[in-house]
Image: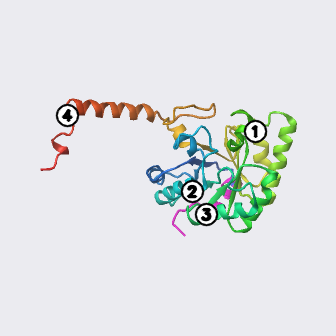
Amino acid sequence: MIANKKTISQILAKKAQGAKISMLTCYDYSMAKLLSNTDIDMLLIGDSLGNVKLGFENTLPVTIDNMIYHAQAVKRGNNKALIVCDMPFMSYEISIEDALKNAGRLIKEGGANAVKLEGGAEIADRIAAIVAAKIPVQGHLGLTPQAINQFGGFKVQAKEKDDQDKLMEDVNALEKAGAFSVVLEAVPQDLAAKVSKETKMAVIGIGAGKYCDGQVLVLDDMLGIFEDFTPKFVKKYADLAGTIKKAVNQYIEDISNATFPAEENIYK
């Protein structure tokens, strides 16, 4: 066991103690290495890399090989946080056999500690099989980006009572299947609070209010790097896009003025 390595037991203990759980997405070695100097609880290699790193319109084109590639990089940079990796679109929907094979690849090849699947009762058999194979699972309910074509856009989910009842049924199905945690995305705060109170799973919110057991944000959003769009639930803790552009423009100017390389940058 790696010293100070975060574990599933520690995540669930924080919920039991009422201590908040912190989670961020991460996609590469350099950021993972920086985050190893923080006390972040969980890192998620999210299929959101399709948007913020690969330039896709949505997460649907992301492949299992894309996820493994980025998971390997994050694992090399951070052995402290609990590393969770998304199972991308169509890597688990077709069959239990596919779900097991691809979850296993994310653990064996990618180095993840757990996998995350989007969906409720309809994928409970996949989750149960993956858990039975000794692979921890985090669920994802509410706004599930892989269902973007079905939802017709990014918007708040489970606002009506019937939809809220269905979400609670899905929560129960995920817990019964053995998931240790669930992400709730873009759902009303009162509903997320109810879920957090009633389930044993660690509930991680993203656009689900302050009463969840923890929170997750896309790293590039909260650092102000990704500028294509900013959801309402994002708090920007920095403006690195502005800093980067300013630095690059200064670099270009220094080259143009022949002030770079300077004497201290030259071999003799």
Say what secondary structure mark 4 lies in: loop
Residue beneath the point at 74% across and 54% down: 93
Q: Position of residue 99 (x, y in %)?
A: 71, 60
C-alpha gap between disc 2 and disc 3: 9 Å
Q: Which of the two residues, 62 or 154, is positioned nearer the viewer here?
A: 62
Q: Judging from the image, what secondary structure is the residue with disc 2 in?
A: helix
* Residue identified by numbered label 4: 259
Callout 4: 10 Å neighbours few (<14), some, many (20+)? few
Mark 1: amino acid: Gln
Alpha-carbon span between mark 1 and mark 2? 25 Å
Q: Which residues are magenta?
A: 1-16
Which numbered marker is on residue 65?
2
Q: Position of residue 166 (x, y in %)?
A: 85, 44
The disc placed on residue 150 is: 1
The amino acid pointed to by label 3 is Arg
Q: Amino acid at mark 2?
A: Asp
Is the residue under label 4 in contact with that under label 1 (CB below 8 Å)? no
User: Label 4 sits on what residue type?
Assistant: Thr
- Cβ–Cβ under 8 Å for marks 1 and 3: no
Quadrant of the image containing the N terminus: bottom right
Lower position in the chain sequence, tag 4 or tag 3: 3
* Residue in front for this viewpoint, 223 or 100: 100
Q: For the residues carrying marks 2 and 4, which lies nearer the camera in this image?
A: 2
The reply, left or right, for residue 208 in relation to residue 35 is right
Please identify, in this view, whether the residue under mark 1 or under mark 4 is nearer the observer.
1
| Relative vertical location of residue 130 with respect to residue 118 in this rendering, above or below | below
Display colour scheme: rainbow
Q: Which residue is mark 3?
A: 105
Instruction: Rate crowding at label 3 as few (under 14), some (14 to 19) or many (20 or more) other CA atoms within 10 Å.
Output: some
